Image (cartoon, grey):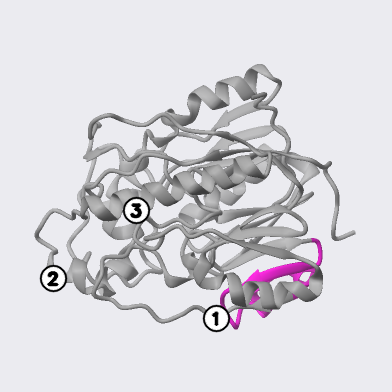
Amino acid sequence: MQCLLNTHNEWDPLNEVIIGKGIPDDFPAGDFTFKLFFHDNIFNNDFFRLNKDKKYSISKQIVEEHNRDIEQFVDLLVELNIAVHRPKTPTTIEKISCRSWDSQCHPALNCRDLCFTIGNKIIETPVNCRWRYFETDYMKHIFHECFLNGAEWICAPRPLILESSFDLKKQEIEHINRPLHENYLDYNKEIMFDAANCLKFGTHVLMNVSNDNQRLGLKWLKSILGPTYTVWDVNVAGNHIDSTILPVRPGLAVVMKPDIHEKLPQQLQDWDLIYIPTTSLSSRDPYLASPKIMLNFLSVSPDCVICNHEYARVLQHELKPYGVDVIAQSIRHSRLFSGGHHCVSLDINRTGELENYFS
């Protein structure tokens, strides 16, 4: 497989992709950043609230079902003549011990979260979760091959991820109500954002910016992308944007919040924005992601998307008038593992060139 990096949007015909791999049967350490990132769902979920003093663990059956579905997703992509690359996986739970905190390393399952591929660039973004600090190491062998084939490989400034690094003033975090630990390395709010805050629309990038950390990330990303790109900032989610809006092709997108239209740039408001409501799910089972993650789909061409069985019928009904086919392929427990088809995939190569869809 070539590892040729060329990707300008979310919908051109997909040729090469990374699919995440390697989920353990224990959650990452329930540290400050874990509770902060998932604060809404942890606080509102009976499983975490009733087991707040215990180690978060899940059954091997759930892990095996999830892993089996991921492998079936890979098989489907191969049948569609798409080259699939896989991260390396840890054989043991690897501890992280840094100067000011401890955690444990998480595998590269949701591999889009921390790496933004655009044009011929790989951009490793500055994480805001301690357990993900070294997650991109599992993909470096792939990035190395891309680099040897002409890709630019950029790493964002490495954050300290201290408790004082976070912008908390705009978040109502009921279970983090203690004084923040002071550290002699404190200097200010840090540049921290995930690649999954961003979507590619040719010469335009849509980036979710909901706090000061992400606003600093916006400034940094603009400096990296340069004048070729226009970066629109919106505030439509806490972090990742791909469970709130996903483009299908130029002029067409699926939205997962009914009130999102007026929050988007005017150019996107002029697109056909199809609202798909999410189903109600029980709070008894452990989950970390919003129910909207179940609708998180991957476009393999402007005329075909892959999504969970739960939403294939309604998505096909809405997209059929536009000539778009929907392939149903479930990823069970995607809400628990915080990733649907778009999250667990990182596009490397799509057939197409850089275009301005809003001129």
Tell me which label, 3 or 1, sits earlier in the chain. 3
Q: Secondary structure at mark 1?
A: loop
Residue 282 vs residue 207, the one in the foreground = 282
Q: Which residues are magenta?
A: 250-272
Q: Quadrant for the N terminus, please.
A: top right
The amino acid marked with disc number 3 is Glu
Q: In the image, is residue 254 part of the stretch drawn in magenta?
A: yes
What label sits on residue 277 in the rendered view? Answer: 1
Q: Which residue is mark 2?
A: 50
Residue 99 vs residue 341, the one in the foreground = 341
Gap between marks 3 and 2, in whole Å? Answer: 25 Å
Q: Which residue is mark 3?
A: 65
The amino acid marked with disc number 1 is Pro
Rendering coords of residue 266 (x, y %): 77, 72
Q: Secondary structure at mark 2?
A: helix
Q: Quadrant for the C terminus, please.
A: bottom right
Rendered view: 70 above or below 16: below
Residue at horizontal 20 percent and vertical 66 percent from the top: 48
Rendered view: 118 above or below 139: below
Write down the quadrant of residue 18 in the picture: top right
Rendering coords of residue 77 (x, y %): 61, 44
Q: In the image, is residue 304 part of the stretch drawn in magenta?
A: no
Observer able to see residue 189? no
Tell me which label, 1 or 2, sits earlier in the chain. 2
Looking at the image, which residue sits at the far left? 53
